[in-house]
Image (cartoon, helix red, strand yellow):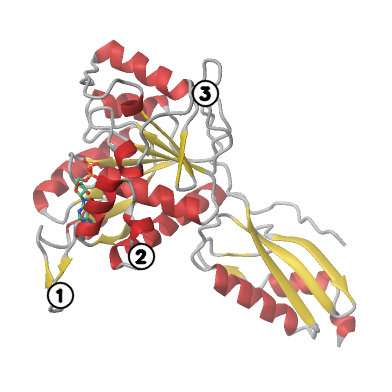
Amino acid sequence: MTDKLTKESILAALSKVQEPELRKDLVTLNMVRNLEISGGNVSFTVMLTTPACPLRGQIEKEAKQAVLALGAKSVQVKLDSDVPNDGRMRGLVNMPIRNAIAVGSGKGGVGKSTVAVNIAVALAQTGARVGLLDADIYGPNIPTMLGVEKLPPPNGNKLVPAQAYGLKMISMGLLVKPGQPLIWRGPMLNSAIRQFLGDVEWGELDYLIVDLPPGTGDAALSLAQALPLSGAVIVTLPQLVSLEDASRGLQMFRTLEVPILGVIENMSYLDLPDGTRMDIFGSGGGEQLAQATETLFLGKIPIDQNVRIGGDSGRPVIVSNPDSPVAKALAEIAQKVAAQISIAAMSGKNELPINIVE
Ligand code: ADP
């Protein structure tokens, strides 16, 4: 049987294995690397487009089975990842940042910062290189949520981000004295933002998560314009009033030609100890917004007091209560966001050369 084991036959077999999110096969996507055949033993690496790939187990299993079916004695599949670059020049932010994802909302208090922090930590936990830019200059509360009190000393004239839970973070809140009000208007706002974006030593990042100010005011607009964004996610509550605001926020990104990666509904429901579920803020709004605006619905996040407790104590719920339904919902949403980024970056790039080491 082993005479069937040639690199051509193996690649032909692997070209029948689909990457379920990208809907193309592993060979077309140039994901098969370092293919080695020794006697009846085969090994290769599958290079995924994100370490946060939710279906990595399935891909590994199908790839292995496809080669075993050719008669291989053993098949070793190694999973690795290389996050694609969105191809945008980030002029101001002169750093190798592959993707920048804005988290926006129509109004404050819907959990935008909470979602930004937990998505960022979830992606960092998968092994991705993640930065978190707290650009919510009116309420920069991410330092509190991550338990960070100050930045490391600057490197020359560059700001060095703080490190927490495997990610790098910078916040306008760490650049002003505690208690000092942040009042930014017009040109001052613009130059502060440009400086803030340009002076940070991020290093190489797979994902920069940007927590934008709520709404569609000057600050949100300046930021979204100053930083080329790969895409934006919109956080909303399930009720109708919030939806109108969220829809305005979504339109702002569309006007700026920032792709909408999807809608997240936060504080969707509360599960009570007796097993009943309460829709405190109404229901179905996020799905409705996604449908009305033809965007993807990324998921619902339940209400859980551990979210607030985690935020107040500097331990995001995804770290403090990783097995809770709310943490699982957040982790799943982070994976979906990463998948959307991969899909956007890979669309059109399907004729890459195959790299084989024998
Ligand atoms: P925003 O950034 O939109 O102003 P925050 O992320 O600061 O909102 O959240 C507002 C408050 O709501 C915080 O106290 C936060 O801990 C709490 N919160 C957010 N999401 C949830 C949730 N799913 N369950 C419980 N509390 C939440």
Q: Provide the residue designation for mark 2.
A: 328
The residue at 35%/17% (across/down) is 192
Q: Quadrant of the N terminus?
A: bottom right
Q: Quadrant of residue 177?
A: top left
Count neighbours of disc 1 (C-alpha within 10 A) and say few if under 14, some if 14 to 19, many if 20 or more. few
Instruction: Tell me whether the residue at label 1 lies in contact with that at label 3, contact meaning CB atoms closer than 8 angstroms.
Output: no
Q: Is residue 126 above or below residue 345?
A: below
Instruction: Tell me whether the residue at label 3 lies in contact with that at label 2, contact meaning CB atoms closer than 8 angstroms.
Output: no
Q: Provide the residue designation for mark 3.
A: 91
Q: Marks 3/2: CA distance?
A: 36 Å
Q: In this view, does 47 lie to the left or right of 9?
A: left
User: Of all residues shown, which one is farthest toward the bottom?
Assistant: 1
Q: Provide the residue designation for mark 1.
A: 273
The residue at 56%/29% (across/down) is 95
Question: Looking at the image, is mark 1 or mark 3 earlier in the sequence?
Answer: 3
From the image, state whether disc 1 or disc 3 is nearer to you.
Answer: 1
What element does badge 3 sit on? loop
Q: Quadrant of residue 42?
A: bottom right
The residue at 55%/53% (across/down) is 127
Whether residue 294 appears in this view of the structure is no
The residue at 75%/52% (across/down) is 353
